[in-house]
Amino acid sequence: MKFVSYKHDNVEKFGIIENNLITDLTGKIGGASNLKELIKIEKIKEAKEYVVSNPGSIKTEEIEYLPLIPNPGKIICVGLNYIEHAKETNRTVEENPVIFHRFPESQTAHKQAIQRPSVSKSLDFEGEMAVIMDEGGKHIKPENALKHIVGFSCYNEATIREWQRHTRQFGMGKNFEKTGSFGPHMVLAEDIPDYKSLTIETRLNGEVMQNAKLSQLIFDLPILISYVSKAMSWRAGDVLVTGTPGGVGSKRNPPVYMKPGDNVEVEISNIGVLSNTVEDEIIHK
């Protein structure tokens, strides 16, 4: 079952999408007005039951997609989490994962444009799997970590490379507006028996740029979830973006960056395809 956040008649809503039809869940299940609230009040099961007697009536052509979780409290990102990506950046794998953060304002959605900022032309793609968390709290043991995953989605953690390299911290290059694409929907963890069997692929204008298996993650999901929880609590709707495979544009010869008019897709088997165009930032004076 696939959950989606969207706008309909200019109102932000959320629901369940099946066969390109959406069942609106806004305010219908425990008063939840968005997907994050539904996760917090632990009403996923009730939402699934509601859809059985309330089949979808809103066509996907009638909506504007929103980032899957438009308002996450935390977006925790992992760097250098595939061997091939670590090699192409000439970095060694450390004892602990490389963690950095995104802010919600940096996000965009499926079928919306990723924005190339006016200050740079080094807009790079990074296809990744996103993990949506429940109210897990702190000090989660690795052996208990997977039960705190609500679902999975796709993420394009598009990066402004030279801004990433301004300092040793990644933050500035990772938080330009409308660069972190998130969606199109969430597949429940219970519907993915073995996430390690999934494959991830990034395509730029139809050409495969990245391809890997989720089994190739250096720091696996239980380790990441447990590690982060030692410092901060996992809250409902928090997002863990798990790292990108090798093949990023900045490490190609010559480099390949995204430009206006491009189409970029991130596909994860059994989850879906996240698709975006690219547009230049419009500066309003």
Image (cartoon, rainbow, N blue to C red):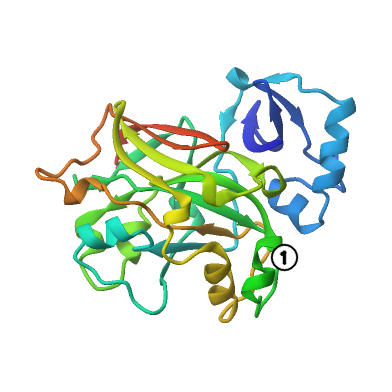
Q: As drawn, is 55 to the left or to the right of 4?
A: right
Residue 123 as seen in the image, left or right of residue 2: left
For the point 43% across and 52% down, the residue is: 106
Q: Quadrant of residue 114?
A: top left
Image quarter where the N terminus lies is top right
User: Element under label 1?
Assistant: loop
Q: Is residue 102 left or right of residue 245?
A: right
Say which residue appears at 46% left-offset and 42% top-offset.
Answer: 199
Q: Residue 236: in sight, yes or no?
A: no
**Residue 49 sits in quarter:** top right
Which of the 4 image quarters holds residue 47? top right
Residue 158 at x, y percent in the picture: 35, 48
Total marks in image: 1
Residue furthest to the left in view is 254
The residue sitting at 69% across, 62% down in the picture is 148
Amino acid at pointer 1: Glu
Rendering coords of residue 63 (x, y %): 60, 25
Label 1 environment density (alpha carbons within 10 Å; few <14, some 14–19, many ≥20): some
Residue 8 visible in image:
yes
Q: Nearer the viewer, residue 284 or 18?
A: 18
Specify the quadrant that holds the C terminus.
top left
Q: Nearer the viewer, residue 177 or 232?
A: 232
Say which residue label 1 marks. Answer: 135
Query: Residue 212 at what x, y percent from top left?
Result: 38, 46
Position of 175 with respect to 224 (left or right) is left
Q: Position of residue 19 (x, y in %)?
A: 67, 20
Q: Which residue is drawn at the image coordinates 47% and 59% (left, top)? A: 103
